[in-house]
Image (cartoon, helix red, strand yellow):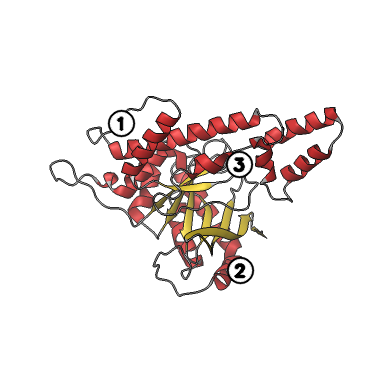
Amino acid sequence: MSHSDLHRFHIPVMGLAFTVDTPVKVARYGISSVVSIIEHNMLEVMREFYYKQNGKDFTAITKKDEDYRAKRITSYLNIINEIVLKQITDLRNESFETGKEINKYFEMLPDTSEAKLLYRKMQASTNQVEKEQLQQELRKFIKSGAIDVNIMTKVDRSNYDANGQPLAQEFSDAQTALRGFANSNLSSSMVFSAGLNPRLYSYCEKFDDFFPDETGFVKKKITLKVSDFRSAQVQGRFFAKKGIWISEFRVESGLNCGGHAFATDGLLLGPILEEFKLNKNALYEELFNTCQTALAQKNRPQYKEKPKMKVTVQGELVHLRKTTFFINTMKLTLQDGEVRFY
């Protein structure tokens, strides 16, 4: 399922729980959000809640089940996706009557978006035939926001069996979470934050969904949170050499990065973005060529067209009732060497 790109912001991950079910609340309005998936026990509790709320029979995934941590994550993401898909179907079938959710969908869009302008035209029309035709066109714009997920790469604790013996590397917290996402039916992005984790990044190679298919479609995309251009370059190269494309670099200043104590030079966003602007073309071409070569070596389908690579900026704190929200203050889109500021 394709996702809406009509909004110019997303709701980023906030701790383990603050955005754990945000997609259920906002995805139907085309707003993307990020879910932390590292805490499988909490996800199992949330899965039970949503199963019962939606009239589904719930069967717990217990510690006796094989690979129960990953299965809990997969099952939770699947039920959230199922709920959002139903919400979108219901929304498309609504009539454009006062107070309906379908009106709210378009009212919340940026005033300059094509969909919003078409919506205003529909409202102003006095010709019933034209009005109905415009409404059918508007329904085609309705898409859900992405249900993206997050793993803090340094949260990669090893786990042990009932006898106290260490489990294999792929059962560590971060790799288990990655497997849970990879096995889900979501088509969205994995947001890696908190720095490079070679063994976790390498584990992505185990799953076909991170690679393009024959048409160039990638079901599971990668977003990297980075503190500066060098971080993007180093981590982007690591993935490109494995044939995995970075769909988005999400920049957070080392001085303003959600409370994480990253070791950086202490630069503000201005100089960081300037470096991206000056070196964007070289970075794009290097990563694309490296990725294509790696895909050929793996006998996997190569990209027939150059894929998109976005650079977004996350920063700027807004305090509301003692709760901190992180808002995207600027977006840059890199495609074919072109950068656009929003």
User: Given this view, does label 1 or label 2 mark the residue nearer the observer?
Assistant: 1
- Distance, label 3 to label 2, CA atoms, is 35 Å
Q: Position of residue 233 (x, y in %)?
A: 48, 62
**Camera sees residue 73:** no
**Camera sees residue 277:** yes
Helix, strand or loop for disc 3? helix
Vertical side of 323 occupied by 166: above or below: above
- Crowdedness near tag 1: few (<14), some (14–19) or many (≥20) residues, C-alpha within 10 Å: few
Say which amino acid is labelled 2: Leu
The residue indicated by pointer 2 is 278
Vertical side of 247 occupied by 85: above or below: above
Say which amino acid is labelled 3: Tyr
- Crowdedness near tag 3: few (<14), some (14–19) or many (≥20) residues, C-alpha within 10 Å: many
Horizontal side of residue 112 vs 284, given as left or right: right
Q: Position of residue 174 (x, y in %)?
A: 33, 49
Sooner in the amino-acid sequence: mark 1 or mark 3: 3
Helix, strand or loop for disc 1? loop
Give the number of the disc on residue 29: 3
- Distance, label 1 to label 2, CA atoms, is 52 Å
Q: Position of residue 255 (x, y in %)?
A: 47, 71
Residue 170, located in which quarter of the rendered image?
top left
Q: Nearer the viewer, residue 192 or 278?
A: 192
For the point 48% across and 68% down, the residue is 256
Give the number of the disc on residue 95: none
Q: Nearer the viewer, residue 84 or 68?
A: 84
Sooner in the amino-acid sequence: mark 3 or mark 2: 3
Give the number of the disc on residue 60: 1
